[in-house]
Image (spheres, grey):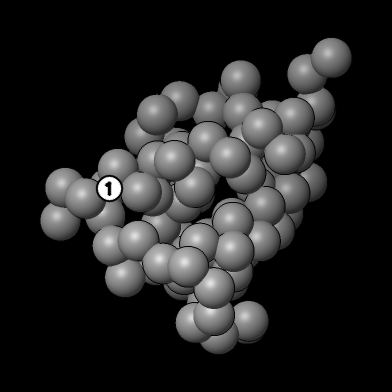
Amino acid sequence: MIWSLIVGAIIGAVAGAITNRGESMGWISNIVAGLVGSAIGQAILGQWGPSLAGMALIPSIVGAVILVLVVSMVFGIKASR
């Protein structure tokens, strides 16, 4: 359980860094983005590549990036410069 939260936070932080929207997200948002993005990415792309805590890393990061971009578009969050 704790390991899943840690891996989810890392995945969310990586997604925030890729999209340049990580500074506006707190650590709870990083965890949520990582866990939900992991579910989205694995549903779309499947379970391939290396995995930690039951989450395939590459599909999870792709799913988290998609989630962060969609949430940013819905709420109108701009990328920090």
Front position in the image: 38 or 72: 38
Front position in the image: 58 or 69: 58
Task: Please identify the residue farthest to the front as the structure is shown.
Answer: 50
Visible residue check, residue 43 = no
Tell me where residue 49 sits by quadrant.
bottom right
Visible residue check, residue 20 = yes
Mark 1 burial class by Cα count in 10 Å: few <14, some 14-19, many 20+: some
Residue 65 image offset from top left, x and y in percent:
67, 52
Task: Please identify the residue farthest to the right as the structure is shown.
Answer: 81
Q: Which residue is mark 1?
A: 5
Vertical comparison of 56 with 20: above or below: below
Residue 15 image offset from top left, x and y in percent:
62, 44
User: Position of 17 compared to 49: left or right?
Assistant: right
Identify the residue at horizontal 60%, vertical 22% (top origin).
24
Element class at badge 1: helix
Identify the residue at horizontal 80%, vertical 27% (top origin).
78
User: Position of 34 compared to 24: left or right?
Assistant: left
- Looking at the rendered image, the quarter that the N terminus falls into is bottom left
User: Position of 14 compared to 18: left or right?
Assistant: left
- Looking at the rendered image, the quarter that the C terminus falls into is top right
